[in-house]
Structure formats: structure tokens, C-alpha cells
Image (spheres, rainbow, N blue to C red):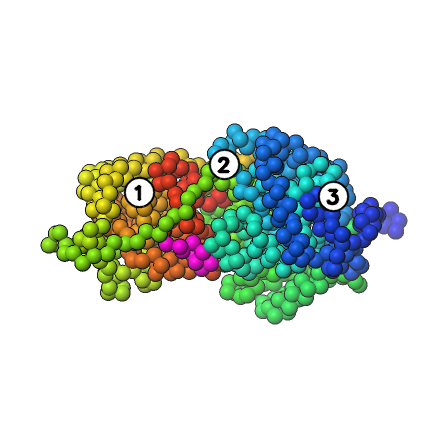
């Protein structure tokens, strides 16, 4: 083609990237890779081939780990962990800086190897994945340096098992390994079976950096190897992958005491209002859905268009789709590369072929070989259509329209996921009004796919829990310094004595701001330590939990109230409890037989004042991200929290749970202490006189074993906390997998209820939503 013809057509010519250096590195290892355990590669064993998805050509042989391999890796990590933590933050920072520098020095090799193994365009590997992986190690090297000062009283968890997906192999490795190492943990990581090569190259640079043996261990294989890691003697599991596998991991780790972070699937909305810059929104959409061939958990795969611009927008979008360049991922001019594997390609085909609506695919020539699928747009679907609800994980965009901002929010939230969302409008006031209403862990305003190590990333609902990046991601790899003791079960007192007071004291439940009889129609006698009858409480059941959750969900206005208002109400509650302190102290003494009632009441009053003080002071941060704009880390309430109150501190424990939750805008369903329930049935009289809105606090009495399951299974409960002396932690965590709600359980360990640990409670009572707001013309 002549130069003049090039200017006439404006066609892109090929700009191929050489794969020679990457293939030479594979050849240096004999084309076969073992695992990286205790600072060295093992001898290659039986396994499978890793192939280039763009050509189908074999790249290397990968070893399938055995149980012995996993055990060896965990053992090496366990042995290395005390020494690694003992280096101190500055000592660990030196190694992490070295890793970051080596990632920079070998950036081109990592980029090409990633594209060969994964099929994504080299521009994406070169310009986003590898630089962002470097950024994570630099950022967390700094975190390691200042950890002792910035996170006092925190220590490493121990050994972390980490499982990463195939869509961002090296970047997901960096997201997980960097914070783990910074805080003094050691790791056993499994890359995805389709894309193991850059993880093995990273193992190579760990040796070059002189990282102590056992600090980083990498084992390869399919999902069964991941199951082995989950079942092994590790202290934390960090998983990125599908929601269904995340659900299985939640059940598998239930009751084990292992910390858990899940970053799962999504069906992210891409909302465009009629005043948006349409051309910019379309370019953003290309990045949102066809970046990495749509194989992105936060892909903007649901296009929600304001009705007045829908026709014009779709016309322009189709024209833009026709100009996308699809082909060899090593060509720097390519926009859309190869699907990672034939299995994933077939899944995409099946989902699209079974869809309704109107399907548009531009007339693009597909390569004769390899796993390629054209950019696809499907319109005319109902919100309930499977393609509007289920993650496709491919270059497929579905679309529908809305008329009002409220309808846009309703459509955006009409999914079981809650990972990310995008809002386009020239009216920033509108964007900032919409962002807090979206059920998503990340919201981009007039942009998409912005990521940084300083900004937390993660979801809500069935997109998982926990954050990666930022202070919240770092904290997830730590725990408070010190050890707790085993919590002995506390049994209710028995007896046949008569009531000291001839006036009947049958306490009702407290639901929706009113006293309510138990649905079961049964009551439980409450006795003192000498067998005297103190009163009766209702035997709660699933239906009582249902009613309480319904009332809590109906009190959603509390989440939108100001911190100042919530503080006033908590102060007022403390005042009213103080006015009846003698009565509550006597009640506690009668139920326990001890003389500690006064101490507990005083501590409960102080706790209410403390959380009232915090109500308007737990704020977000503007994170230092490298864009012309801000990333706001906004604290939001978790929602409806179900909690099993402690038996050893019935009033103080319940007040602590309630105070932390209410201060942050949550509503609670409290399962009263099974041994001393009258402390809470007396307390709702205080609530009645303290202007607490109906439904914000609901109290159900009964045995914790009967109430834990309905709370953990309920789809409208957002989190379950358990401080019961009954051994229910495992059951709660297993049942919570149904909708992957957050859990905070005691795992049968004691807690110091008099400790000044407000910050931990407030962190548990909030989610961090990251809102990215670029600015400038």
C-alpha cells in the first residue's frame, strides 16, 4: 500500500510485537514448569499444556499440584512466616521495592508473556496490567515502611492462601501478594490453570530479589488444587473468581476461623443520561465492555440509556463497533484480542444463541484460527432476561432504557451482584446524587475502569466482601495483637421456684417499634442462679425473624439520616439508660448472681456516649490516585445486621452491637442473650422513650440455635454478627453463603467487652464505596 492510499483509507497497518524474548524464557526452563516452593522450582511433573488462545499453539507444560505439593508449600510458608514478620516493616519494604523495580526492568517480558498466555491485546498488557502491578508493589512497599506507625496494635494473620483468575493473571497476583507481604504474611498462591506463566515468571524475579525462601510459594493446577489450598492449614483465603466458586469456598471455610476475602462476579450497569457527552460515553463504553474481550468482573455489560437519546446513542455505538479492530493480540493496533480458552468461547456462544432481543454484530473478519468472538450488542431485553441478570464474561453488551433517575437506579440495582457501576452526565450534581444510591463497591463518574493501589476495590451482595487496595485492603491481612481464650458455653439457669413478684413479667418481643407476641405462642421461663423465677420471654422462630427483618428493611430512612441526628438519638438513649441505671444493675445481678451489674450498666452508658461521639466523625477519604481527579472512599452502612448477643455481658454486649450499628446508619435485629434475655426486654422500654425510629432496633428472644439459621439464610439480611456462647459460628458462615452476606463471628473465642475498641466495631458496621471523579475538560 502506498502512502497516499494510507491517507485515503486511514487504515491501520500491522504493528507486531516480537514474542522472541518470552519464548526464549520459556525455552530456558525446558518448556516445562514445576512449582515454586521454598525459594526454588520443583522438578516438572504430570500436568497439562498452556496454549496461546490466539493460535492454539502450545506454549509450555504446567505441572498439576498434588496434595503433597500443597502441603509442602504451606509448610514452607509457615516456617518462613515468623522470620518474615520479624524483619519489621522497613525490612520487608526493601524486598518489596526490589520486586517493584524488577517488575519494571522486565516489563516488556511480562507484557508479551501475558498476552501470549491470556490472549488480551498487547496494548492492554503493556499500558495497564503491568504498570498497575508495579504500582501495587511500590505502594505496598511504602505501606510496609510505615505499618508500625500507621497500624499500631495490628499484626500479620500468618499464612495466606490466594487463588487468582485468568483474566488479569499478574495484576491479580499483585493485588493479593503485595498487601500480604507488606503486613508480614507469607503466601501460597495458585494461578489459573489457563494462565500460569506470568505467575511463574514472578516466582523467577522473587529469586532474583533475594526474597527469603518460603515467603512466596506458587503451585499450579486446576480447581482441585484450589480446593486443597482452601482446606489446608492457612490463616486466610483470598479468592477472585466466579460467584459460585466463592459460595463453595465460603461453605468450605465455615467455622474454621480462617479470614476470607471474596472478589466475585458482576453485572455492572453503565448509565448514560441525556445530557452526557455521547461520543465520550461511547468511547468509555468501548473500554467498559470490550476491554480484555469483556472478560472483566466489573465490565460495564448492562447499558442503561436515557430514553430521549437511546436511538441516537445506539446508532453511533454500532458505527463505533464497526471500526473496532479484532485480531492477533500481539499486534499493537488491535482493539479486541482472543477469548482465553475454547471452553469459555463456547459458553459465550451458547448464551448469545439462546438469547432473545435484537442482536447486532459488526461485519468484522475473524481470524481463521484461535478463540475469537465479535463485539456483540443485544437490545430489546426485559430486565428479568437471563442476559440482563447473569454474567456472560465475554464481549457481549446488553441494553435497555429508562425514563427517570429513580428508574435508572432501580434498574441498576435489579441484580444479585454489586461490584461496579458507571454514571455519565455533564451534571455532576446528578452523578453525585446517583452514586450513593447504587448497590456497588465502586462507582465511576464520566469514566470507567479506573484502578489504583490506593483505592479499594471490591463488591457487595453476591459480588463478594472485603476490599483489595487502599487502607481497607491492607487491614484485611492483619488482626489485633494478642490471643483470646476459648469461650465456655453458658447455660441458662434452671429452677422450679415461684416468682418473687406476683405481678406477671412475660416480656414480649420488640419489632417495628412495638411489642409483639411470639408467633410460636410459646414462652421460656427465665430463672435466677438460685432457681427463682424472674419472668418469661417468648420463644422466637423463623416467622419472628421474618417480621423483624421486614421492619428493619422498612426503616431504610435511618441510613440517609445525618450523623448529627444519629448522635443525638444515641446520646438521648444513654441519658435514659442512666436514669434507670439502678434498675438495670439490679436486674443484671438477679440474673447472674454476681455483683457486677453496676459496672456493666456504667460501661453500657459510656459505650452509647462513645458511639454517639463517633456517629458524625467516621468519614471517608480522598485517596491519592494518579489522575487529575479524586477517588472518594465513602463510608456507607452495611444495611440490616442480624446479631446474636453475648451471654457473658448481656447488656453491654447488646448495647455495643446496637450502638456501633446505629451510629453508622444500620438497622439491627438483635437475638437477645439466651441466658439473660430480660436485660434486653427491659431495654426496649428505654428505646421507646429515646426517639429511636421504629424498625431501627428489633429484639427477638429465644434460643440462639433456633434464631441463627433464619438470620443467616434471610436474603434481606446484609450481615450477621455472632457473639453467642453457643457454637454457632460454623453454621452461620455456611448458611450465609446463600447470598454471600458478610459475617463477623467469635469462633468460640472470648472477647473483652470492656476494651476500648470502637474503631473495629465501626469498620465492621460500614462498607467502603470508592467513587472516582475525574475533572477537567
Q: Position of residue 523 (x, y in %)?
A: 23, 61
Q: Which residue is mark 3?
A: 204
In the rendered image of this protein, does residue 671 appear above or below residue 625?
A: below
Label 2 element class: strand
Quarter placement of the C terminus: top right
Q: Position of residue 96 (x, y in %)?
A: 65, 35
Residue drawn where x is 12% and y is 52% of the image: 501
Q: Quadrant of residue 601?
A: top left
In the rendered structure, which segment of residues is drawn in magenta?
726-736
Tally the marks.
3
Q: Is residue 77 visible?
A: yes
The CA distance from mark 3 to mark 2 is 31 Å
Q: Are marks 2 and 1 in contact (CB under 8 Å)?
A: no
- Nearer to the camera, 83 or 535: 83
Label 1 element class: helix
Q: For residue 729: magenta? A: yes
Q: For residue 23: magenta? A: no
**In screen coordinates, is 409 left or right of 708?**
right
Residue drawn where x is 66% and y is 46% of the image: 217
Q: Are marks 3 and 2 in contact (CB under 8 Å)?
A: no
Q: Which residue is mark 1?
A: 652
Q: Quadrant of residue 594?
A: top left
Q: Which residue is mark 2?
A: 154
Amino acid at each position: 500500500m502506498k502512502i497516499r492510499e494510507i491517507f485515503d483509507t486511514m487504515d491501520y497497518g500491522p504493528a507486531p510485537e516480537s514474542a522472541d524474548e518470552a519464548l526464549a524464557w520459556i525455552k530456558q526452563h525446558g518448556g516445562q514448569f514445576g512449582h515454586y516452593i521454598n525459594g526454588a522450582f520443583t522438578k516438572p511433573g504430570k500436568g497439562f499444556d498452556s496454549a496461546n488462545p490466539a493460535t492454539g499453539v502450545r506454549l509450555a507444560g504446567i505441572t498439576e499440584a498434588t496434595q503433597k505439593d500443597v502441603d509442602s508449600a504451606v509448610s514452607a510458608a509457615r516456617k518462613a512466616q515468623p522470620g518474615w514478620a520479624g524483619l519489621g516493616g522497613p525490612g520487608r519494604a526493601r524486598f518489596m521495592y526490589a520486586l517493584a523495580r524488577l517488575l519494571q526492568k522486565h516489563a516488556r517480558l511480562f507484557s508479551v508473556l501475558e498476552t501470549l498466555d491470556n490472549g488480551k491485546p498487547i496494548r492492554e498488557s503493556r499500558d495497564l496490567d503491568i504498570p498497575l502491578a508495579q504500582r501495587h508493589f511500590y505502594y505496598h512497599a511504602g505501606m510496609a515502611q510505615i505499618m508500625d506507625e500507621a497500624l499500631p496494635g495490628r499484626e500479620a494473620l500468618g499464612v495466606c492462601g490466594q487463588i487468582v483468575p485468568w483474566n488479569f493473571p499478574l495484576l491479580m497476583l499483585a493485588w493479593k501478594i503485595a498487601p500480604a507481604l507488606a503486613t508480614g504474611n507469607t503466601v501460597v498462591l495458585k494461578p489459573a490453570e489457563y494462565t500460569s506463566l506470568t505467575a511463574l515468571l514472578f516466582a523467577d524475579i522473587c529469586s532474583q530479589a533475594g526474597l527469603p525462601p518460603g515467603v512466596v510459594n506458587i503451585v499450579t493446577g486446576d480447581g482441585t488444587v484450589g480446593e486443597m489450598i482452601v482446606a489446608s492449614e492457612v490463616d486466610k483465603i483470598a479468592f477472585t473468581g466466579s460467584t459460585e466458586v466463592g459460595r463453595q469456598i465460603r461453605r468450605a471455610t465455615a467455622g474454621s476461623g480462617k479470614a476470607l476475602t471474596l472478589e466475585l462476579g458482576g453485572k455492572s450497569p453503565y448509565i448514560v443520561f441525556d445530557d452526557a457527552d455521547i461520543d465520550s460515553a461511547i468511547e468509555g463504553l468501548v473500554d467498559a465492555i470490550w476491554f480484555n474481550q469483556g472478560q472483566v468482573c466489573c465490565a460495564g455489560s448492562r447499558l442503561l440509556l436515557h430514553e430521549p437519546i437511546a436511538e441516537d446513542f445506539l446508532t453511533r455505538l454500532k458505527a463505533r463497533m464497526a471500526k473496532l479492530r479484532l485480531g492477533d493480540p500481539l499486534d499493537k493496533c488491535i482493539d479486541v484480542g482472543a477469548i482465553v480458552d475454547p471452553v469459555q468461547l463456547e459458553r459465550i456462544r451458547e448464551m448469545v444463541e439462546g438469547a432473545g432481543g435484537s442482536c447486532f454484530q459488526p461485519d468484522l473478519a475473524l481470524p481463521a484460527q484461535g478463540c475469537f468472538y465479535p463485539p456483540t450488542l443485544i437490545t430489546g431485553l426485559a430486565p428479568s432476561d437471563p442476559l440482563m441478570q447473569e454474567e456472560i464474561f465475554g464481549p457481549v453488551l446488553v441494553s435497555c432504557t429508562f425514563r427517570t433517575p429513580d428508574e435508572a437506579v432501580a434498574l441498576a440495582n435489579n441484580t444479585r451482584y454489586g461490584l461496579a457501576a458507571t454514571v455519565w452526565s455533564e451534571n455532576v450534581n446528578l452523578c453525585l446524587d446517583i452514586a450513593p444510591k447504587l448497590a456497588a463497591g465502586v462507582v465511576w463518574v464520566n469514566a470507567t475502569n479506573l484502578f489504583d493501589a490506593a483505592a479499594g476495590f471490591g463488591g457487595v451482595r453476591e459480588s463478594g466482601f472485603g476490599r483489595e487496595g487502599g487502607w481497607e485492603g491492607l487491614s484485611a491481612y492483619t488482626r489485633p495483637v494478642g490471643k483470646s481464650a476459648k469461650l465456655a458455653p453458658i447455660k441458662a439457669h434452671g429452677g422450679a421456684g415461684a416468682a418473687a413478684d406476683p405481678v406477671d413479667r412475660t416480656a414480649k418481643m420488640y419489632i417495628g417499634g412495638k411489642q409483639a407476641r411470639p408467633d410460636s405462642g410459646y414462652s421460656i421461663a427465665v430463672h435466677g442462679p438460685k432457681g427463682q423465677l424472674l419472668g418469661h420471654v417468648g420463644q422466637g422462630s423463623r416467622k419472628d425473624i421474618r417480621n423483624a427483618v421486614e421492619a428493619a428493611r422498612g426503616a431504610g430512612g435511618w441510613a440517609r439520616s445525618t450523623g448529627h441526628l444519629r448522635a443525638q438519638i444515641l446520646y438521648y438513649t444513654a441519658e435514659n439508660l442512666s436514669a434507670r441505671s439502678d434498675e438495670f444493675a439490679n436486674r443484671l445481678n438477679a440474673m447472674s448472681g454476681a455483683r457486677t451489674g453496676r459496672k456493666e450498666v456504667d460501661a453500657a452508658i459510656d459505650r452509647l456516649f462513645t458511639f454517639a461521639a463517633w456517629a458524625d466523625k467516621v468519614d471517608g477519604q480522598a485517596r491519592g490516585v494518579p489522575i487529575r481527579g479524586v477517588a472518594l472512599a465513602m463510608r456507607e452502612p452495611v444495611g440490616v445486621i442480624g446479631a446474636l448477643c453475648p451471654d457473658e455481658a448481656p447488656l453491654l454486649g447488646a448495647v455495643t452491637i446496637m450502638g456501633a450499628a446505629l451510629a453508622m446508619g444500620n438497622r439491627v435485629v438483635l437475638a437477645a442473650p439466651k441466658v439473660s434475655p430480660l436485660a434486653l426486654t427491659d431495654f426496649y422500654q428505654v428505646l421507646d422513650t429515646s426517639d429511636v425510629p421504629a424498625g431501627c432496633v428489633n429484639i427477638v428472644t429465644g434460643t440462639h440455635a433456633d434464631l441463627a439459621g433464619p438470620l443467616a439464610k434471610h436474603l434481606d439480611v446484609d450481615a450477621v454478627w455472632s457473639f453467642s456462647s453457643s457454637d454457632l459460628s460454623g453454621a452461620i458462615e455456611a448458611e450465609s453463603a446463600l447470598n454471600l452476606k458478610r459475617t463477623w463471628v467469635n469462633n468460640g473465642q472470648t472477647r473483652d467487652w470492656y476494651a476500648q475498641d470502637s474503631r473495629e466495631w465501626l469498620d465492621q458496621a460500614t462498607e467502603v464505596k470508592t467513587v472516582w471523579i475525574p475533572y477537567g475538560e
